[in-house]
Image (cartoon, rainbow, N blue to C red):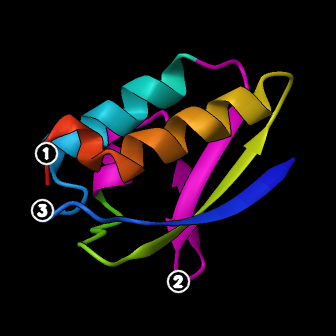
Amino acid sequence: MITTELTIVNKLGLHARAATKLAQTSGRFASTIRCGHSGKMVDAKSVMAVMLLAASKGTQLTFEVDGNDEQEAMDTIAELIAGFFGEGQ
């Protein structure tokens, strides 16, 4: 299992579009992917669960990835977040 903390850097945080992109990206992998903060962890493959985290810009999310493709999944998620969810800022 890989555990990593990533900071939400896009201006709008995990709003609907960003949460959808995170859930869709997570859903491409067989690994179990959970994310959260302040002790609350949710299934990163669920758009609603991710949105309920209410993660704004600057929020540090903990990601736990467990499975055969865990490293690829973690790298892809880190790239998505660092790339502002494809939103440009």
Q: Is residue 55 left or right of residue 67?
A: left
The answer to whether 54 is drawn above or below residue 30 in the figure is below
* Percent x, y of residue 88: 13, 45
Q: Nearer the viewer, mark 2 or mark 1?
A: 1
Foreground residue, 35 or 9? 9
Indicate which disc residue 65 carries: none
Q: Is residue 56 left or right of residue 16?
A: right
Q: Could you tell me which quadrant the C terminus lies in?
A: bottom left
Q: Residue at x 54, y 16 (%)?
A: 28
Query: What residue range appears in magenta?
Result: 29-51
Membership of 78 in magenta stretch? no
Q: Amino acid at mark 2?
A: Ser
Indicate which disc residue 38 carries: 2
Q: Residues within 10 Å of mark 1 (few under 14, many from 20)?
A: few
- The residue singled out by tag 3 in the image is 12
* Percent x, y of residue 19: 28, 44
Q: Residue at x 32, y 45 (%)?
A: 83
Q: Amino acid at mark 3?
A: Leu
Q: Is residue 63 left or right of residue 79?
A: right
Membership of 30 in magenta stretch? yes
- The residue singled out by tag 1 in the image is 88
**Considering the numbered disc 3 on the image, is that residue within a helix, a strand or a loop?**
loop
* Mark 3 to mark 2 CA distance (whole Å): 20 Å
